[in-house]
Image (tube, rainbow, N blue to C red):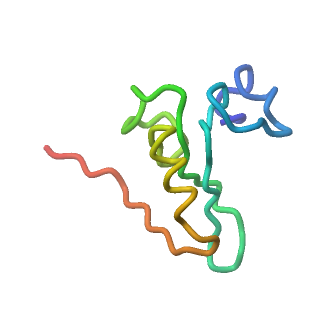
Amino acid sequence: MIRREPRKYAKYKDGLKGGPNNPLGARALYLYDAEGRDTYLRIHGTNAPETIGSAVSNGCARLTNEHVKDLYERVEIGARVFLYPKVTTA
């Protein structure tokens, strides 16, 4: 996000506490590959729920803050996650 919109997001380079003002919403699940490397993909909440399902989040999966908070509490660290590309119909 910083590379795509540095004027908007560079101020968050050192992180930002989760919550309603955070671009990643109230919670974010950081996804790593089998070797433990960050994939830079996240499952996260959003403070702009109207953007869910649109390509505005660098490939991340956006949920409502309520849904991601619930998921965050129920998913164990190390859980296997599958993200599928968006399917479009012609």
Would you place residue 55 above or below residue 40 in this image? above
Would you place residue 19 above or below residue 70 in this image? above
Q: Is residue 16 left or right of residue 74?
A: right
Position of residue 12 measured from the top left corner of the image (x, y, whole percent):
79, 32
Q: Is residue 43 left or right of residue 16?
A: left
Would you place residue 39 above or below residue 25 in this image? below
| Rendered residue at 51%/48% (across/down) | 68
- Asked where in the image residue 64 lies, by quadrant, the reply is top left
Location of the N terminus (image quadrant): top right
Location of the C terminus (image quadrant): top left
Instruction: Give the residue at the far left of this rendering.
Output: 90
Position of residue 31 measured from the top left corner of the image (x, y, whole percent):
61, 62
| Rendered residue at 54%/28% (across/down) | 47
Position of residue 19 measured from the top left corner of the image (x, y, whole percent):
66, 33
Query: Could you say which is closer to the camera, residue 85 or residue 66?
Result: 66
Query: Could you say which is closer to the camera, residue 53 or residue 88?
Result: 53
Q: Count of labels shown?
A: 0
Instruction: Give the residue at the far bottom of this rendering.
Output: 35
Instruction: Give the residue at the far top of this rendering.
Output: 7
| Rendered residue at 54%/66% (across/down) | 75
Query: Could you say which is closer to the camera, residue 65 or residue 50?
Result: 65
Position of residue 14 measured from the top left corner of the image (x, y, whole percent):
86, 39
